[in-house]
Image (tube, rainbow, N blue to C red):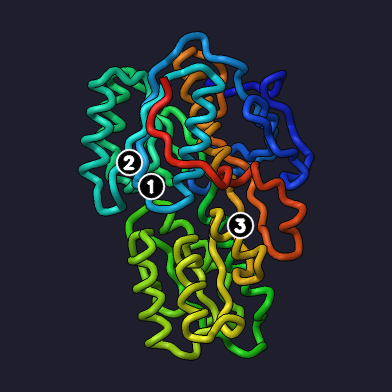
């Protein structure tokens, strides 16, 4: 069922950066974009304001499955789902598979969650296609599945709470293309899109490559790898060693965070620029300090909150937006002081929480 444009969802014209920082019980209304038709990869986006429920009708049991908790990005999503569960008054169980190579573990964890009584499941998917069978099975058991952050191809999903990683990659590529337009001196860019095969990675890669096409940006062969710090650090080291003329390191937030230390050690800070195609606390701090040039903000905290709200709405038979995500904007040194940090990142002292009772 699709949410109507009445009291629960209003058309919005307010820029996302102007949205005030949310209190624990009042994060909404929030500037967002709905995709129609829902679940399409090239659907039309419409600006809207997302409004959440005040409370759930009962303490539903919701299971949340993440690929891992290795970086601050998923910590931010964890903060979002946990705080929204508390606010709505529902139970929450969070599991993490251990990395993007652990698809079978993620599937087993999800099945265990449902066997343990989960009413709905929220999945940050390891694989774009690899969870389709389990999603279909859950639909057959009347257990709705919400796709959060990464994206899945299953037509049996109940809803999606995510942004377009194509747009995230494109915004990063556009930033570089505008600095180095066609006709200017060619610059080499090391590109680190993340773990091969993940839906969000392929989307970001496509967006980035299309955005730099026709510019003076020469993208080196993409270096795919897990978003653990050690894995990304090794990949960046390989590129710096193989291509001493590289002028930018661009890729995941973990790549950007790891690159800072490597460039300092090699005396290259200032000579080699760093960009991330999504935001984390480390990337935010890097931009503040002038070490990282820019990054699009996808408000991962809000994506987590919306996913929980969607799950409750589906369980209670209420109107909901099937495919929605926070509005994306680019953060750099010029505007970072105007950005409401709490809208896009978890608190600095937040530690992983795995259950809400």
Crowd rating for badge 1 (residues with CA inside 10 Å; few <14, some 14–19, many 20+)? some
Query: Mark 3, mark 1: which one is toward the viewer?
Result: 1
Q: Name the residue under label 1.
A: 69
Label 2: which residue? 96
The residue tagged with tag 3: helix, strand or loop? strand
Residue 69 in view in this figure: yes
CA distance for labels 2 and 3: 25 Å
Image point 46% across, 24% down: which residue?
A: 311
Residue 95 is situated, as x and y percent measured from the top left of the image, at: 32, 36
- Residue to which mark 3 is pinned: 296
CA gap, disc 2 to disc 1? 7 Å
Q: Tell me: residue 109, above or below residue 115.
A: below
User: Considering only order in the chain, which callout, 1 or 3, is on the residue closer to the N terminus?
Assistant: 1
User: Which quarter of the image is occupied by the C terminus?
Assistant: top left
Residue 35 position in % (x across, y down): 57, 39
- Whether residues under marks 2 and 1 lie with C-beta atoms below 8 angstroms apart, the answer is yes
Residue 265, given in percent of the width and then of the height, sits at 47, 81
Element on which disc 1 rests: loop
Q: Distance between the residues labelled 3 and 1?
A: 21 Å
Q: Which of marks 2 and 1 is nearer the N terminus?
A: 1
Mark before the other along the chain sequence, 2 or 3 = 2
Image position, residue 83 (x, y; %): 53, 30
Q: Is residue 95 left or right of residue 295?
A: left
């Amino acid at each position: 069922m699709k949410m109507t444009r009445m009291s629960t969802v209003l058309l919005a014209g307010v820029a996302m950066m102007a949205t005030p920082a949310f209190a624990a019980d009042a994060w909404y209304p929030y500037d967002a974009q709905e995709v129609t038709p829902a679940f399409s990869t090239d659907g039309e986006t419409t600006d809207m304001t997302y409004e959440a429920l005040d409370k759930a009708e009962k303490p539903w049991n919701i299971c949340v499955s993440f690929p891992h908790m290795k970086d601050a990005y998923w910590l931010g999503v964890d903060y979002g789902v946990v705080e929204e569960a508390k606010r709505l008054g529902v139970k929450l169980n969070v599991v993490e598979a251990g990395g993007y190579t652990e698809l079978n573990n993620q599937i087993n964890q999800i099945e265990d969650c449902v066997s343990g009584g989960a009413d709905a499941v929220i999945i940050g998917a390891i694989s774009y296609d690899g969870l389709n069978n389990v999603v279909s099975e859950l639909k057959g058991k009347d257990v709705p599945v919400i796709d959060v952050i990464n994206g899945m191809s299953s037509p049996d999903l109940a809803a999606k709470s995510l942004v377009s990683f194509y747009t995230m990659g494109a915004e990063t590529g556009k930033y570089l293309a505008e600095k180095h337009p066609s006709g200017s001196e060619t610059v080499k860019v090391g590109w680190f899109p993340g773990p091969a095969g993940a839906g969000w990675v392929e989307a970001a890669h496509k967006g980035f490559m299309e955005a730099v096409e026709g510019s003076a940006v020469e993208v080196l062969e993409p270096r795919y790898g897990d978003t653990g710090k050690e894995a990304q650090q090794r990949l960046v080291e390989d590129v710096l060693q193989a291509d001493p003329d590289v002028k930018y390191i661009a890729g995941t937030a973990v790549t950007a965070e790891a690159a800072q230390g490597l460039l300092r050690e090699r005396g290259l800070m200032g000579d080699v620029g760093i960009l991330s195609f999504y935001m984390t606390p480390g990337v935010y701090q890097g931009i503040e300090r002038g070490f990282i040039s820019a990054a699009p903000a996808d408000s991962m905290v809000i994506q987590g909150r919306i996913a929980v709200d969607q799950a409750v709405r589906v369980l209670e038979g209420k109107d909901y937006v099937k495919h929605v995500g926070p509005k994306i904007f680019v953060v750099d040194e010029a505007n970072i002081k105007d950005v409401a940090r709490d809208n896009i990142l978890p608190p600095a002292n937040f530690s992983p929480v795995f259950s809400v009772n």
